[in-house]
Amino acid sequence: MQLNVASLHKKSIIDILISSNKTHLVVTGAVNSGKTTLVQELVKSIKNDGVDQITTFAKEKQCVLFKTNYCREFAVATYDETVATQRCKMKIVENTFSKKCIDELDKCINSSNKWCVIDEIGYVENSVKEYQDAVEKLMKSKRCVLVLRKQNSDFFNKIVNDENVFVCDLDEKLPQVTCVIMASGQSKRFGKENKLLATLFDKKLIEYSIELAKSSLFSKSFAVTVHKEICEICKEKNIDCIFHSFEDKSDAIRLALKYAENSNALMFLNSDQPLVSEKSIEKLLLSFLYNDCIIRLGYNNVCASPVIFPKSAFKYLMNVEKGESGLDAIKQSGLKTICVNADNEYEVFDVDTKDDLKELMET
């Protein structure tokens, strides 16, 4: 089952919204998709910059109410069964949207707060050009978060198509990405034992990657390894495994590509990074959804792994030469690369030595 954006953790969505570097943020989606709940969490992230809030909400078969930081709620529309449209049976109260609401927007425009949140802009506003102009004026004066009821209207389309607006559609499906666990390393710096079989807390290192790869976030998952023990663990954990005897990482990459030749994108997950979180994977997938380029997890804007490669990069991965890695494919492709920041540095920490393992144990 292909998940949609609304199924993700709110913090994952908010992190991508905030890091988009767009001036304005729009949240849209179907009724009960979680738009308001998401925006309420988003407000907590931006409150230190100061936030004005404009709230418009309907009471079923009664009225539409409007309120801001600066005024109590008042009715801007009332229910009227005779209204011709099937979707909205509300009739606008005279001099509300066209005057009183605009006065309240002006207060927000003139405030020192850097942000303004409007939750939500629905159907009744479509017939009030003066109010639409006031919203546009507001968007020119400060950063805005707008909750938009999904609809096909000139006003809705104008906002979501603005180049300064980042749109998060909670109904949108996540991209279908295949997860490849890279588990063919020789553990030369770790000692005689295979580091992927070493125990961190209550699990083997490889088991962390397997559990993450089996997430419903991925359309397909499998491991690539030269180790029979890893194959056995994969079998026990019910995840596909490609067993091979090649020595070079480039061969493992080509095997993965061949096995996933019908995939639209691949995410390479290093099996010696046990603390990569599901929330970070969500952020990688969201960033890929909105950008369709190479996406890398990092920390403090220093790129690391995992890495998502779009299909347009597969030919470069397939031509990686002996002694090279996926990083060389990134350079050769010339494709845009985006770094998505993990919540902490240990998510991108890879275990090469027993001291590294000990450091993770002590975090």
Image (spheres, rainbow, N blue to C red):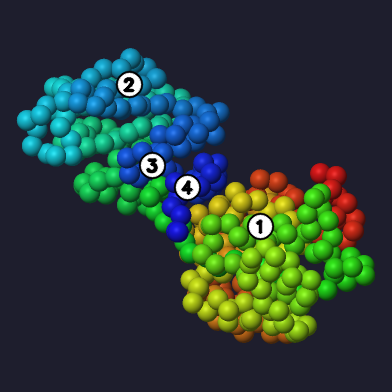
Disc 1: CA contacts within 10 A as few (<14), some (14-19) or many (>=20): few
Hey, what amino acid is under mark 2? Lys
Q: How far apart are the alpha carbons under marks 4 and 1?
A: 19 Å
Q: How far apart are the alpha carbons under marks 4 and 3?
A: 9 Å
According to the picture, the residue beneath numbered tag 2 turns out to be 67
Hey, what amino acid is under mark 4? Ser
Sequence-wise first label, 4 or 2: 4
Please give the label number shown on residue 211: 1
Q: Do labels 2 and 1 touch, CB within 8 Å?
A: no
According to the picture, the residue beneath numbered tag 3 turns out to be 33
Q: How far apart are the alpha carbons under marks 2 and 1?
A: 47 Å
Sequence-wise first label, 4 or 3: 4
Looking at the rendered image, the disc whose residue lies closer to the viewer, 4 or 2, is 4
Q: Do labels 4 and 3 touch, CB within 8 Å?
A: no
Q: Nearer the viewer, residue 102 or 276?
A: 276
Residue at image location 58% in from the left, 57% down from the top: 215
Which picture quadrant has residue 117? top left
Looking at the rendered image, the disc whose residue lies closer to the viewer, 4 or 1, is 1
Hey, what amino acid is under mark 3? Ser
Residue at image location 63% in from the left, 67% down from the top: 239
Sequence-wise first label, 3 or 2: 3
According to the picture, the residue beneath numbered tag 4 turns out to be 7
Element on which disc 2 rests: strand
Residue 295 drawn above or below residue 282: below
Q: How far apart are the alpha carbons under marks 3 and 2?
A: 23 Å
